Amino acid sequence: MPMVLAANANASGSHVGEWRHPTAWNNPAANIENAKRLAQIAEAGKFDLIFLADGNGVRQLDKPALFAATSPSDRPGVFEPVTLLSALSMVTSHIGLVATATTTYDEPFHVARRFASLDHLSGGRAGWNLVTTSNPDDALNFSHTEHMERGNRYERAAEFADVVKGLWDSWDDGAFPQDKEAGQFLVPEKVHVLAHKGTHFQVRGPLNAPRPPQGHPLIFSAGQSETGKDLSAQHADCVFAIEGSMPAAQRLYADIKGRLPKFGRTADDMRILSGVTIFVGETAEEAEALFQQLEDLVSPAVGVDYLSKMLGRKMQGYALDEPMPKFDEEHVGHTGIGKAILNMAYEEGLTVRQTYRRILPQMGGNMFKGDAKQIADTMEEWYTTKACDGFMIAAPVVPTGLERFIRLVVPELQKRGLFRKEYEGTTLRDNLGLGRPANRFFAA
Amino acid sequence: MPMVLAANANASGSHVGEWRHPTAWNNPAANIENAKRLAQIAEAGKFDLIFLADGNGVRQLDKPALFAATSPSDRPGVFEPVTLLSALSMVTSHIGLVATATTTYDEPFHVARRFASLDHLSGGRAGWNLVTTSNPDDALNFSHTEHMERGNRYERAAEFADVVKGLWDSWDDGAFPQDKEAGQFLVPEKVHVLAHKGTHFQVRGPLNAPRPPQGHPLIFSAGQSETGKDLSAQHADCVFAIEGSMPAAQRLYADIKGRLPKFGRTADDMRILSGVTIFVGETAEEAEALFQQLEDLVSPAVGVDYLSKMLGRKMQGYALDEPMPKFDEEHVGHTGIGKAILNMAYEEGLTVRQTYRRILPQMGGNMFKGDAKQIADTMEEWYTTKACDGFMIAAPVVPTGLERFIRLVVPELQKRGLFRKEYEGTTLRDNLGLGRPANRFFAA
């Protein structure tokens, strides 16, 4: 199976300082011309897919420096991802289009319908990144007074995904002969009424859309808790995994794939993509210089705000050049990331400034830096030792970093036989080597 | 103010038999190439907008003939409208893009966000057709056991629209300087936290999108009940009105526009579009022949099923060529349309067959037939006598009927100075002569 390459398509990048770089897009907020160009760059580079993270809220209202100075992780000025990818389906022809949607504050019928629609619009290139919403404050935008409790969110998510897949199977393939002569638009025997009655949802169906070209648009997920890994093993075609070291990534890979048989699936039914920020240059020095340049674009106020956000606790007021203070575990992070950052700081004896500088450029915990050969070596090693099946790549700066990755690294991967020279097929499933799922209500 | 022309963009038309016509699209279900072509035809004809009706369910499961043989009004094989219009924004440049979304089974934050996104994608061409969902069974797709009661639906809709507009005003114009040098992405003083707490919703905000190019994407509505008309007067920029006669349309027009001052608005703040199916030919005979041809494409089984649907009662088993049976009012229709159909049948002494044939081609109760001059005369009379400000046109057959309307009628309207030769501006508001609304939280 060839290596999977996915491009993070956030128009202002993943590094908190990168939008300020001279070669970054000007005016990235809700800019369709930029988004179009980025998708076309990724497609010219034969990337499998572009990926849009998402949330339903503006996060940094209470962190003034971060609120005023940064755009990437907080996204106050972005397109709604399914509308954006629907638009991009018209100006691309092969690349996969993967958008995030939450199971916590949406309805299975709506989500099934929108991704079915995107799959039809794009000729089978849609993917749904299933999230349960990590930002508690998003609840306040949906008439909830507090965020749904984690266990409940995951239980709801599993049922939600099951309903969505059931709705995608509402119609058999070939249910719409649209026979003008016979006056038969559809075949009544080829519809299935789902009649789902579960703990969280009652959904009758059928969906008012023909079965998607891919059967089911791909499902992505990223949870690394026990419940999150089980959810992935049950429902996900692709998992976005985040580990800072290769051995940890190998363990996670084995863990998640090891759960598949429990749900009647095999290791080949899933692709695991490792999230990584890649700085590549003509030389290793050039890559390092770019990295330093981005760090310099982040003021201490923004850096400390960012560190506070990642740790889930206020970090203002600590001396920047003193060692990271000791915190009890319960005083940090609603996610595992906070804990990982602290461990790193303690193990390496980092100061507060060193810590925030260290975490700034990393999209969820991992970074490769170097020249093309070094990057390709690392990617090959991760890939061949089953740390991952491919990569979810943030390539600072947008768009020049992605262009540089494609110019320098992609040919090196192709030369080694690790990456495609042409798209294998027309759907995202074709290109990922994932089969088209059978319809659960109709025998093939 | 010039006449407004809107095109019904349902790919299989509005007449129950028209998809079977030899010149109709082949394979209209979820066909993006057709949809693209239709939008481009309408734009070449300088139409103000294309319009997509919508529902969240498959309606005719229990009406076998209609279920198998028809597509238009029941839409089992369509795109989700906002995704489709997002795609079409990339292949058009001036025409307005108006999609239906329900306030009964969706969230104000999601709806505000999607239409803001469509407005950004299209450079200010988005419109939202606000509906409260007419089909009771749609409730069953959203974990409800029964449809929300009408009064409650309208109360919820009014609050929903108010929240959506408030979210669109989350950011002042110019809130995102994206100043690389200064490191200032946004201006913190230019965001407003809505903090809405109402009867149906609690929505904190702000919306995670810059203010839409139009300020507010246009709001369309169509209700003709007292509460529906008040909702329109309070929130709608455009009203889609349905009356079968010019005097009735004039009364409705005066009624709705007369309600505007109550909400601090003037008659010029709203455009009323009359829904009409137009059969035009090189001669009146050609138009009549097409009309008869479509009726012949509808089998009695489908016709009676359709009549049953419109009346809201079972009509199978009545002799086709006997007069329409007498029914008490409470035995028909959850909508006003059923009553109007019965009154027509009784007044004119129509048989069951004549009645269903009479209603089949009409999109919501009105039809113009004739040559170009006759059609233009009628449109001019409706327009100049304030029966409407323009028309929501279904032009059988798709796409040939729309092409014929543009070839024959549009030049006649242009010659009379009633319709534009070129688009007035770049946004839908520009073209409709509707000003950009002020931001309620920020002085201009």
Image (cartoon, coloured by chain):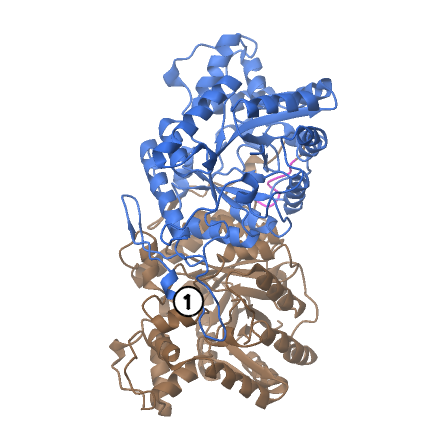
Chain colours: A brown, B blue
Q: Can residue A104 be spotted in the picture?
A: yes
- Could you tell whether B383 is left or right of B222 in the image? right
Q: Position of residue A184 (x, y in %)?
A: 63, 32
Of A425 and B267, nearer the camera is B267
The image quarter in which residue B359 lies:
top right
Of B193 and A173, nearer the camera is B193
The residue labelled by disc 1 is A74
- Could you tell whether B87 is left or right of B286 in the image? left
> Which residue is pictured at 62% across the width and 89% down the height?
A283
Badge 1 density bin: few <14, some 14–19, many ≥20, Cα 10 Å: many
Q: Can residue A434 be spotted in the picture?
A: no
Q: Residue furthest front?
A: B444
Q: Is residue A439 above or below residue A62?
A: above
**Which SS type dominates the magenta stretch?**
loop
Tell me the quarter of the image containing the N terminus of chain A: bottom right
Q: Is residue A320 above or below residue B179?
A: below
Q: Position of residue B266 (x, y in %)?
A: 42, 34
Q: Residue furthest right?
A: B282
Instruction: Magenta stretch: give its range.
Output: A171-178
Q: Secondary structure at mark 1?
A: loop
Q: Is residue A236 above or below residue B19?
A: below
Please state the total of marks drawn on the protein image. Answer: 1
Q: Position of residue B330 (x, y in %)?
A: 36, 18
Q: Position of residue A174 (x, y in %)?
A: 62, 43
- Could you tell whether A125 is left or right of A341 in the image? right
Chain hosting mark 1: A
- Could you tell whether A193 is left or right of B418 in the image? left
Q: Is residue B297 above or below residue A9?
A: above
Amino acid type, residue under disc 1 in the picture: Asp
* Residue B148 among magenta residues: no
